[in-house]
Each structure stands twice: as C-alpha cells, then as structure tokens.
Amino acid sequence: MAIQARVLILAKGDEQAARLAEGLDPLGWRTVTARSPSAAMAALGDLQIEAAIVDLTDEGREVLSLPQRLKAACSPRRLPVLAIANPDPQLASAGFDLTLAPPIHPLQAAMRLESLVRMAVAEEEFELRLQTFAEHGRRLEPPQTEGGALRILCVGEPAPQFLSLSNALSQYEAQAVGAFTSYTAFDYLHERPFDAVVLWADENRQEALAIVAGLRRNTRLFHVPALLYQRGPLTLPAAEAFQKGFTDVATADVAEIETAKRVLELARCHRRQTALRRALESARASGLMDPQTGLFTRALFAAHLTRLAAAAKARNRPLSICVLKLANTPEIARARAEGWLEPALPQIGAMLGRLVRVEDTAAHLAPEVFALALPATGPASARLAAERIGAVVACTAFEAGDRRKPFVATFDIGVAEIAPADSPGRALEEAAAEAGRRTGT
C-alpha cells in the first residue's frame, strides 16, 4: 500500500522527530522523516506532501537556504515550511513560515500545520481569483500586511514575571496593552484589533480558560493566537491547554525575552493571515457577485471552477464540489407558496458565504440551489463541511407571516470530487443529481 504522508520532517536526529511523528500520525497528519536535504527533496518528488517541518537544533547557517529549496521542489503547489528552533527574525527572512520553540507538543504542531496549510491553499486561491476577475474586467488588490508595531494584549494580575514579559515585548517595539480582568480584556478586544493575546495563569487558571473559550466562540476573534503563560511548572497539561484553544504554552521559568520572541512570531503569522483573508473577502465588493447574496454568480462560478480544476491537477491537490438544494419539506413548500421563501433566500445565501472557509468558493446557481467549491479537500471532508453549514442554517428561523410559525430551511446535499481526468461540468452535474435525488426532483 502506498504511503499517504502529509508532512515531511527533516531532522538529523530522533530527539524531536520521533516524538513528533509518533504524535502527529494518529492526529491525521501522517509523517515521513528524511535525514538529509537530498532525501527530503526525493520525498517531495514522490509524495503528496502538504507541509514540511525542519528541526534546526544544532544546525548551522547553511540550512537558511532550505525553505526556498523545499518550496521550489513542490512548485506550483505552495509548501509551508515550519522550523523547530528559538524564534529569530532571520529565519522568517530565509523563508520559514513559522518558527516554534522546542519542545513542540504534537497537538500544538497539528494546529499550526492546519493553519499554515489552509493559508497556503488560500494564497493559491487568491492567485486564481486574480486571474478569473481580471478575465471579467476587475482587479483585486493584493494582500497588504499591516505595518507598524505588533499589538499584544497581556491579560492577568500585575505579577513581577508578567510585567517582565510585557517589558520584553516592548523592547521589540511591540505595543503591549495590559488588562487585569477578563472584562477589561474583552472591552479591549472589541474596541481594537490585536495580533496576539498573552494570558497569565497562576494557581487560578479559570479566568484564562474563560477568556480563551470566549475567543474561540467569536468568529471575529477565532484566529487570534493565544499564549498561556503559567507562573510555575505546568499546572495545566500542555495537551489539555491546546485542546482548550491555546496556541502556545510557556512558563515563567523560561527567560522573558525567549517567551516574547514566541509571542511575536505568532503575532506576525496572524497578521499575514489576516491580510490574506481581507484580500480574498474583497471579492465581494468587486461588482461581479450576485447582488442578492454576495456569492459568485452562475457564470462567474463556471469560469472560476474551470480554473480551479486545472490548478488542482497541476498542484496534485484534491478538489471537491458540493451542491446544496433547498429540501422540499412541507414547511418550505408552504413558505414558497405563500411568498415567504423568496425574501429569505438572500439571507440564506449570505449565511453560506459567511460559513465557508475563506479559500472556498460559494455560488448561487439558481433561486433555491447553491454550490461550494472546496480546494485541497476530499469528498468525505467536503460532505462534512456542507452538512455543518446546512446544520447552522437549519438552526435559523425565517419569517413566515403574522400568526405563523417561522419556517426552517434545510438542504439536500450532493458531493463529487473533480478527478484530474474529469471535466468540472460533469462533477457539478453529478453533485446536482445526488442533491436532486434526495429532493425527489
């Protein structure tokens, strides 16, 4: 059976690599390990690698050329390269997308890999949208990463170690803002944007857990990295901290300057991702989208889908398409007959646009039919995504007139993968036929 590795680990020794590989494999990030750059290049040529991790422990300056060589070996597929080392601006200049300080917990690595791979796919998607929109006479502005000082929110009591970390951040010309309570913290988070959050936890860690839970429940703040800074030895196990939504974990035993570097590394990465998301979302103001829903029109979607399929083949990535057709339930039939369904369609379409990932393409194909194109996504994952979106829409009640119970919109879903030998149109027809069979039309 062929190896379906997703992550390449380049390491001379086993101290980091073996533990990381053992932890990543059961998390869905199957790994392959290379002991030399030449072996890494061979693996990239043979396997469908999505990301690379390079252990820089005890390595010299010669490794600074590695990221560009690894990325070139995967072209035109974008390859995020993560370094295991103490954060250093020189590593970012060399082409490493993110640096994590050892030791790395597998859950921490898995979360960062997911984020970096999605960002790589989003960058590929933006390149394709530039071409599609230019073909239709519109120019999208490229991502513009915000300049100026990185903004870090530090939340917790004014303990000496915590104040020392804030001072260390300021030494790197970051803007460190202090908040002593969760209420003040959320006031700040809703008033202004931050690139990262540091949460101090002593014996009482409940406030830090409550704040990170609030971040992960908020769609606007969901992606903001959060570092848990613990007073002494880990009172909250690393695995539990990452499961709760923390991006990194440090203790006051680590030098403040090293912890500050870790925070700033996460903040810089978040700022780049934010710029990319804004650039992709700017398509909604292009004048080409469906005016009712803000989604791709049928014609624009067809043009873009053809380009997506060609790119997926060239980059050796999967591409799936989903068709979501409003189910012909009695309450939807009644809403349609009484004229309440049509006014709800713009809201339904707008919800779909907000629920998809930024790199996905959502379209309004017909009055009651929507479609999603999901790059770098297999059919099983695509179906899960479509079902999740449908479940959220089904939790919304839509107006059905005076003295009438609001109606709920549910979807019949069809999914198809666009194989390299298939035409996009055929896959779209296959997904539409499945949705139609479920609807009975």
Image (cartoon, rainbow, N blue to C red):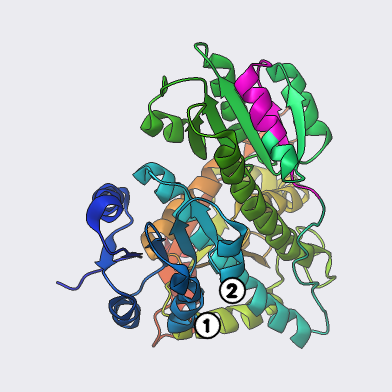
Q: Is residue 408 visible?
A: yes
Q: Whole-percent x and y of residue 245?
A: 51, 35
Q: Residues within 10 Å of mark 1 (few under 14, many from 20)?
A: many
- Amino acid type shown at disc 1: Ala
- 201 part of magenta stretch: no
Q: Whole-percent x and y of residue 150?
A: 75, 46
User: Is residue 198 depicted above or below 413 in this figure?
Assistant: above
Residue in the image at 78% along x and 49% along y: 343
Q: Is residue 435 visible?
A: no
Residue identified by numbered label 2: 124
| Quarter-of-image position of residue 289 | bottom right
User: Of helix, strand and loop, which one carries label 2?
Assistant: helix
- The count of marks equals 2
- 154 part of magenta stretch: yes
Residue identified by numbered label 1: 311
User: Of helix, strand and loop, which one carries label 1?
Assistant: helix
User: Is residue 8 depicted above or below 100 in this figure?
Assistant: below
Magenta stretch, residue numbers = 149-167
User: Is residue 411 depicted above or below 435 in this figure?
Assistant: above
